[in-house]
Amino acid sequence: MNRNLDVWAIQKYPNELYTALENVKTDTGDLILFTNLECDFELNGQTVKRSFDTSLYYDAGNGNDALILLMKAGIATADQIREYLEKKQLRYHEVSLAKDFNNAYKEEKDDENIPEIWFAREEYVLRDALNDSIEQGNITCDYYPLLQGFLSLNYSANSNLSSYSVDGRKILGVITLEDKMILLINNGNDERNISPFQAHKIMEELGVSVNVLSDREFNIEKPYQGKMIEKK
């Protein structure tokens, strides 16, 4: 799989699924719908209780590429994806694997206190995310430039403890606001990766007050501290 695809994570606003699907304009058989996925999600060594169990993968080239994720037990469903693709007569493959509930995999219940999560692969996504917050009156943020994490989507083999990796994202840098967390994707040496300097510059350009914190201060139960450092 192409690990540098853009990411649409559909969570608390299910209508965003159709906005994401409108970008799917490929009919070359490269659409793959994965269902019943297992999700490992960590930030700074802390488990993020926001699980994604469905993904739609497409990579038609020319910038038309993305990974659409659906939150487990969310309002948006795999059936909606199937219905949309069939209505648009877009060919796709579906992959699924029944879970063995006797194995060591343990599922975490979703933590509703965790805000909406955005994944920013490149600059325009970060700008969109920040502008969305600004429109809601959120103009202060905490920025953890060195905080690392990962999101891994996989299937576990029923017969043993091995697993098959479907997709994943490495994260370097987290921006937290009152309404969302923005996770900066950093997979390999992709030129679209957002550096700490770029991220800070974009926030300043948009008029967002930035409180830079160390990863030691990050708490997944309260990612946005909401306390700004006074400039002297």
Image: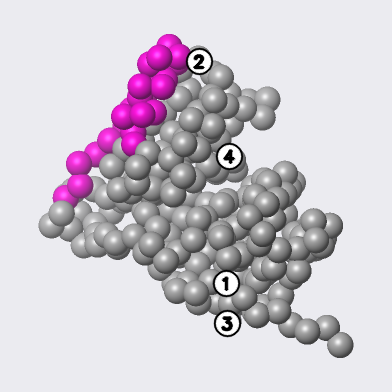
| Three-letter residue code for mark 3 | Arg
Q: Is residue 220 magenta?
A: no
Q: Is residue 93 magenta?
A: yes
> Callout 2: helix, strand or loop?
loop
The quadrant the C terminus occupies is bottom right
- Which residue is labeled 3 in the image? 216
User: Which badge, 3 or 1, is on the more N-terminal residue?
Assistant: 3
Disc number lying in front (1 or 4): 1
| Three-letter residue code for mark 4 | Leu
| Separation of marks 3 and 1 at Cα, in angstroms | 14 Å
Q: Residue furthest top?
A: 89
Please name the residue shown 72% across and 44% down the image.
124
Q: Can residue 163 be seen at all in this image of the molecule?
A: yes
Residue 175, quarter of picture? bottom right
User: Which badge, 2 or 4, is on the more N-terminal residue?
Assistant: 4
CB of mark 1 within 8 Å of CB of mark 2?
A: no
| Three-letter residue code for mark 1 | Tyr
Is residue 68 placed above or below 42 in the rendered structure?
above
| Separation of marks 1 and 2 at Cα, in angstroms | 43 Å
Label at residue 224: 1
User: Which badge, 4 or 3, is on the more N-terminal residue?
Assistant: 4
Q: Position of residue 178 (x, y in %)?
A: 58, 65
